[in-house]
Amino acid sequence: VNKIMSGPGQRAWELAIRLSEQYQVTLYTPNISDLTSEQFQIKSFDLLNPIELRADCESADYILCQTVRLYLREWAGKDTKIIADLFDPIFLEALEVYKYKSLKYQSEIHQALIEEIKQTIINSDYFICANQRQKDLWLGFIFLLGKTNPASYHDYPNLENLITIVPFGLPEKLDLRKTSNTPGLPSKDSGILRNSSKGNLNSKASLRKKFGFSDHDKLVVWTGGLWNWFDTEIIIEAFKIISQTRRDIKMVFYGYKLVNTDMGSEVTMSADKAYALAKKYRLLDSAVFYYPDWISPSEMLNHLEEADIGISTHYDNLETRFSNRTRALYFIKARLPFITTKGDIFAELVEQKQLGRVVDQGDTNQLANTIIELLDSDLNSIKGQFDLIDQELSWDQGVANLNQMLAIDNTKYQQFKLKPKKDTKLKYLIRETLRKLGLLGIVRSLRIKVKERQINE
């Protein structure tokens, strides 16, 4: 949790702000944060020796965290409820992150993450996630690990007593031009209009100024990490086509230098290949540009005010299906029309609300034509569509969903809690035969086994 932070940190920060309006909040981070708040306390702890958490865990009414370690359950007070934030199905993400490693290494990581998720589910009382697809995914875990039973199901047939959706939200009354140590986010009332502000922002990191773009150049921007599960190569291939007829269209990628330095080339091979392609096609620093450093949310949104459209292209896989792309939220916050690949929830949103264009995965010609078509369309007519989704992606609405769930007392269902037992193979076969064929079926099966043994002898 810092001025410059990724999705998990932003989510923790924003939820702390909203929850502090009703609760006394302490935000713990595994780093010493460079942020301060008058609304809640910020403390740091050591991941390897998290003893600093113990006192607050014992006295807390609720513990909200993204991974529930066993020590949190042990340290939690008698009446303390633990809420697991399952917005990032990391076991699916890891399948893409480590796919260039050996299968032995991948299997070890996968096994460890599955066990971590199991412990998180088992040791939590409530669950939140970021969208409906994620909820459907986690319902399977919740059932399988015995967190529900017929008694609670009959009272809450959609399991709203256990899991609810808290989406990544949009800001409401924050001014983009505000300068403070708090991450700034834009609002439709911020007084800054896209296009009219091109090249006029009082920012030393102005996007157009940095790269020498003119007011007539049309900018396509990519925000967020350049990970292997994103298809950045197709964008370079598309710009090879575009550059043959349109010199005014420019592509800007963010965060390339930081991603490669911190994460290593094995998880950004797709980005490296795309960069090499841009050099090979002589597009680098003429049609395709890389902003070297990661920037704060406030700065990113300032830059998006200077852009014309956003873009996010990915592959067809499980990570995509159950993802919740914070990069898409940047486009929505900035009211920036954007192009995305089919497959995730934001592709559905773009189509339903007409926020831009959705393209097929892997179709280079379609992508090139779509970029040109969208840039040449009436972008201002699309901007009004973003007003229709403010309430759907509201932090306040998400916290309201959380509070509604927490108001439900699940203690009365504890007497019906499932107690899984380990079965031997024989016990399992007897139980299944009894269920399917009855007592006589067991007798017949035993007679058959005896005859088989006699014949074999």
Image (cartoon, rainbow, N blue to C red):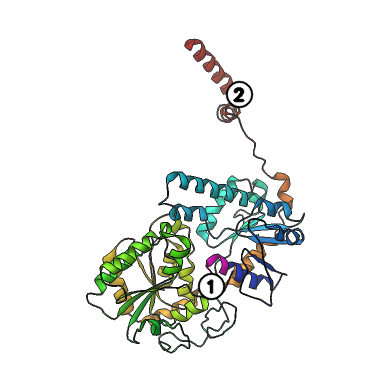
**Mark nearer the viewer, 1 or 2:** 1
Instruction: Farthest residue to the left: give it.
Output: 244
Q: Nearer the viewer, residue 352 or 199?
A: 199
Q: Residue at x 56, y 72 (%)?
A: 394
Residue at (54, 57) in percent of width and height = 135
Give residue 440's position: percent from left, percent from top: 58, 21
Residue type at tag 1: Ile
Side (left or right) of 316 relative to 78: left
Residue 45: horizontal and vertical position, in percent?
66, 62
- 221 lies left or right of 410: left
Extreme-front residue of the structure: 261
| Viewer-side residue, 147 vs 261 | 261
Percent position of residue 293, x then y = 45, 73
Dot 2 falls on a residue whose secondary structure is: helix
Q: Which residues are magenta?
A: 1-10
- Give the x, y percent position of residue 178: 56, 85
Q: Residue at x 62, y 49 (%)?
A: 119
Q: CA distance from mark 1 to mark 2?
A: 66 Å
Residue drawn at (50%, 73%) of the image: 389
Quadrant (top left, top right, bottom left, bottom right) of the N terminus? bottom right
Q: Which mark is residue 439?
A: 2
Can residue 380 be seen from the camera position used here?
Answer: no
Q: Using the image as rendered, state which of residue 387 and residue 14 is in the foreground.
A: 14
Q: Which residue is mark 1?
A: 4
Q: Secondary structure at mark 1?
A: loop
